Structure formats: structure tokens, C-alpha cells
């Protein structure tokens, strides 16, 4: 009989926000033999936890070992506030554990933007708001200040930072600007300081910096329906359908309705229209949130009426039938020896290939269950196939800023999510010890991989350059 093997245990966690009172989390046991395994969960004070407990039967893998998973439902509010749980897997006479908690990225820098007042507000009401928006930062502590022509503004309104639901935060701050101050071309500055990520940046805006020239457009309102991403469906267990209405000269009189199989969806949220002063037009979004099962089985349409439209505009959307669906092949490669020899950084490559549809997500984690941010991921690119079947490939790289991080022996995991995978996610893990064997046994393959990866990156950058060039000529 085959020799018994202990399982490798991996957390299955939800990163996103949820509108439900509970969130489903769990763990995945892989590569164990024999196939019998028991799961249990405890909360952060070591009490047994079984709310929503489910255990799925063990599945025989191609290598002759088994995999199995189990799940529980936990309170969403506590989960998003960093409550932790522990998954215990008992196999034969050995029990192993995994921590279930939303990972945090220490010192994550904010993304900063500043927005001018809406022209209608300034012209009709005599004043408007200049808004400063910072997002995707961690930890929560952040400072925002304002200046007008280098003079400090004391009456700014800064809201409390709120969670994005993915381990980071966002915050909004604004000032009220009079028509006189705006028309005299005063400069308004938003200064953001985030000490934990060594971030200090200032964004400026004034009337002269906002393009106010007449822009030639076709004058027609455009309506586009955007399907939910698989990442949102998997992480949040919801399917948001987005109807985007662009090129409106006036924001008043807009009505948007979503339908599922010709039945009105009542929980449609219409966001406040945003004014783009560069083209002097408004854009609005109407989001209908449905359950994943409805998205898989129903037909949807977005109906838009507006005074500038001669008739009601209707766009339809449905999930593709999935007849050509194909699960991805995931290959994880260690840093190249030539890079390690420089004793500076260390870059791993996760090559994901042969998948369809192209909707996919990739995340990187270390052995401390911390999601990593030094990641560059290309978009899916269609592969050339002799069978004429459409498949896609992408490349994701993780760069460690110090080679010492690699030499420490810590492991790194590339997690790939795709609807065609049996459990919707798969992952590959590597560390320095396992990479040594790869160097010995597959040295030529590593060189070939990095040659392929380099070509992939160059082609990706060339495509960006081409897009930028075409856009430049269009603008001209």
C-alpha cells in the first residue's frame, strides 16, 4: 500500500466587502493519503465554532493523493474588522492548523486624486466643492490638509477613513470654493501624509489647469453594460451589474432600470453623475447587485431614459454559456540565478496559460498569510492555438525588494482564481529550498521561461506604447 502523506493546509478567505450579515471562509487540505480527514474550527478565543459548517468529500487528485475542503460562516462585520479564526485538519493521528484572517499589507501607500468643482454648481449656486480622494492605503491613520495659494485652509471637511473591505482604507476630504475664488484662478492644494508608508504628496487644481475649451463630440449619449468580474463573484459572493451612461450634457432627468428576465430589479443604485470638465459632459453608473446564481441563469437588460435621448435606450447582457471554458495551467518559477547573483532583488514569475474565458484574478501571499503588493500582472492575451480554440495567457511577477527576503526561507504562493477550476482557485507555492532542486534539474527550462517572460513583458509594453500612440494621434 502507498505510504501515508500528511496534508498541506491552505486558508480560503474572503477579501471583499459583503452586503450579507455573514461571510463564508474555510480551508483547503491537499496532497494527503489516505483520503479520510476531519475538519474543525475555533474562534480567536479558542471556542469551537460551527456556524454554517460544511465539509466536502475528499477528491482523488491526479497524483494519487487527495484534496478536501471545509467552510464556516462568520459575522461579516467582525471579519472585516480583523477577527481571526483557526481551521484544524485532523489526518490519521496528526492535526495541523491554518489561520483565517483578512491579510494586511503594512505601509501600503495611498492613491491620490483631486477633483474640481462641477461647473453647474459654480455657475448656478455661486460655489462648489473641490474634492480630494485617497484610497488603497494601510494602516488607517492618515493626515489631509488644504491650502489656497499657499495659505492654510482651516474649514475643510475630512470624513473618517472607511474600509475598502480588502484590508485597505479610503478617505474623502473637501473644501467649499466660491465662484469668485475659482474665477480668479486661485490654486487649491490637497496635501496628504501617510507616515506608515513614508508617503507625502500634494495635488493642485485651479480653473486654468482644467481644460475649458470646446470639445468636438458626436453629441450622443452612450450606454454600456459591464458584467461582474469573477473576482468580485468569488470574493464577495455577489454579482454587480453596471450600466454606464456617458456623454450627457445635463445630469437631470436620468432614469435607469435593470431587468432580470423582464422582471424589474428593485435594488438598483444610481451613483451621482460625475462631471468631466475636459469634455464638459456627465457620466453616471447604475449598479444592480444580484446573486451569482441569477447571473449564471438569467438574461439582463439595462433601460435608460434621458431628455437628450430620442427613445429609451436598452442594452442587454448575459453570462456566456461556457461551452469553450478551460481551466488555467499555472506554472510558478523562482528568481533567476543571474538576478540573485546581484544580491539586490528577487523576482518570481507566475505564468498562467491555456484558460478561457479571460476573466481571471491573481494574488500573491507569503507564508505569514500577508497579501503582497510588489506585483505586476499583465492583462489576459489571446494565445495562438493550432486547434483554433480561443485560450488566454498572462504573466504575474512578484518582486522582493531585498534578496534577504528570499534567502530567509519564507515561502511565496501564487493564487489564481478562475471559474473553470474545480474549487474556483488553485495555487502554487515556492521557497528557496524547493527552488534549489529546480535549478539543478531544470536549469535550461528556467532560462527558457525567463526568455519567454521577458518577451511577454516587452510585447505587453509595446502594446501599451501602441495604444498611447494611437490615442495621441486621435487627440491631435
Image: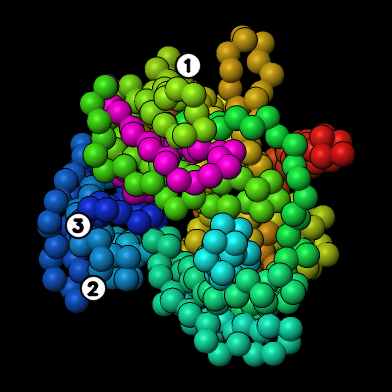
On the image, the x and y values in percent for residue 307 come to 47, 34
Q: Which residues are magenta?
A: 233-261
On the image, the x and y values in percent for residue 8 come to 37, 51
User: Disc 3 designates what residue?
Assistant: 21
Residue at image point 58% right, 17% down: 390
* Colouring convention used in this rendered image of the protein: rainbow
Residue at image point 51% right, 37% down: 245
Q: Is residue 476 magenta?
A: no
Q: Is residue 257 magenta?
A: yes
Looking at the picture, tell me which residue is in the foreground, 404 or 192. 192
Residue at image point 19% right, 66% down: 42
User: Disc 1 designates what residue?
Assistant: 324
- Please tell me the numbered disc located at residue 44: 2
- Please tell me the numbered disc located at residue 472: none
Left or right: 333, with 290 as reference point: right
Q: CA distance from mark 2 to mark 3?
A: 19 Å
Q: Nearer the viewer, mark 1 or mark 2?
A: 1
Taking the view exactly as shown, the residue that stands out farthest to the top is 387
User: Which of the image's four quarters has the C terminus?
Assistant: top right
Q: CA distance from mark 1 to mark 2?
A: 44 Å
Residue at image point 52% right, 33% down: 308
User: At numbered mark 3, what does the secondary structure look like: helix, strand or loop?
Assistant: loop
* Label located before the other in sequence (3 or 1): 3
Looking at the picture, tell me which residue is in the foreground, 62 or 167. 167
User: Which of the image's four quarters has the N terminus?
Assistant: top left
Amino acid at each position: 500500500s502507498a505510504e501515508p502523506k500528511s496534508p498541506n493546509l491552505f486558508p480560503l478567505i474572503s477579501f471583499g466587502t459583503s452586503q450579507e450579515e455573514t461571510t463564508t471562509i474555510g480551508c483547503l487540505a491537499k496532497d494527503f493519503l489516505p483520503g479520510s480527514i476531519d475538519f474543525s474550527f475555533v474562534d480567536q478565543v479558542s471556542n469551537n465554532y460551527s456556524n454554517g459548517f460544511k465539509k466536502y468529500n475528499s477528491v482523488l487528485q491526479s497524483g494519487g493523493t487527495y484534496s478536501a475542503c471545509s467552510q464556516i460562516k462568520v459575522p461579516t462585520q467582525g471579519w472585516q474588522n480583523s477577527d481571526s479564526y483557526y481551521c484544524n485538519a485532523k489526518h490519521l493521528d496528526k492535526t495541523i492548523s491554518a489561520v483565517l484572517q483578512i491579510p494586511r499589507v503594512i505601509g501600503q501607500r495611498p492613491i491620490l486624486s483631486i477633483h474640481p468643482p462641477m461647473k453647474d454648481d459654480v455657475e448656478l449656486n455661486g460655489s462648489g466643492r473641490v474634492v480630494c480622494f485617497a484610497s488603497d492605503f494601510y494602516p488607517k491613520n492618515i493626515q489631509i490638509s488644504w491650502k489656497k495659494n499657499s495659505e492654510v485652509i482651516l474649514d475643510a471637511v475630512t470624513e473618517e477613513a472607511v474600509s475598502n473591505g480588502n484590508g485597505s482604507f479610503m478617505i474623502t476630504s473637501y473644501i467649499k470654493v466660491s465662484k469668485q475664488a475659482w474665477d480668479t484662478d486661485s490654486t487649491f492644494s490637497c496635501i496628504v501624509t501617510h507616515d506608515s508608508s513614508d508617503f507625502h504628496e500634494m495635488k493642485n487644481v485651479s480653473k486654468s489647469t482644467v481644460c475649458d475649451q470646446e470639445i468636438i463630440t458626436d453629441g450622443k449619449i452612450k450606454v454600456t453594460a459591464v458584467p461582474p468580474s469573477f473576482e468580485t463573484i468569488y470574493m464577495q459572493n455577489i454579482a454587480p451589474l453596471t450600466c454606464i451612461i456617458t456623454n450627457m450634457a445635463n445630469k437631470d432627468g436620468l432614469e435607469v432600470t435593470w431587468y432580470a428576465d423582464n422582471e424589474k430589479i428593485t435594488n438598483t443604485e444610481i451613483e451621482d453623475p460625475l462631471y468631466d470638465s475636459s469634455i464638459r459632459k456627465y457620466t453616471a453608473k447604475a449598479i444592480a447587485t444580484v446573486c451569482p446564481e441569477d447571473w449564471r441563469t438569467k438574461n439582463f437588460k439595462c433601460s435608460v431614459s434621458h431628455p437628450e435621448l430620442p427613445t429609451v435606450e436598452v442594452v442587454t447582457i448575459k453570462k456566456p454559456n461556457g461551452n469553450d471554458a478551460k481551466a488555467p495551467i499555472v506554472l510558478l518559477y523562482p528568481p533567476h540565478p543571474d538576478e540573485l547573483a546581484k544580491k539586490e532583488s528577487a523576482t518570481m514569475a507566475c505564468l498562467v496559460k491555456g484558460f478561457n474565458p479571460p476573466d481571471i484574478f491573481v494574488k500573491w501571499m507569503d507564508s505569514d498569510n500577508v497579501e503582497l503588493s510588489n506585483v505586476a500582472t499583465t492583462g489576459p492575451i489571446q494565445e495562438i492555438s493550432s486547434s483554433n480554440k480561443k485560450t488566454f495567457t498572462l504573466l504575474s511577477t512578484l518582486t522582493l525588494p531585498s534578496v534577504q527576503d528570499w534567502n530567509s526561507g519564507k515561502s511565496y504562493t501564487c493564487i489564481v482564481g478562475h471559474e473553470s477550476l474545480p474549487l474556483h482557485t488553485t495555487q502554487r507555492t515556492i521557497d528557496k529550498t524547493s527552488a534549489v532542486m529546480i535549478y539543478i534539474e531544470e536549469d535550461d527550462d528556467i532560462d527558457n521561461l525567463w526568455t519567454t517572460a521577458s518577451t511577454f513583458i516587452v510585447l505587453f509594453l509595446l502594446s501599451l506604447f501602441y495604444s498611447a500612440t494611437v490615442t495621441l494621434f486621435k487627440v491631435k
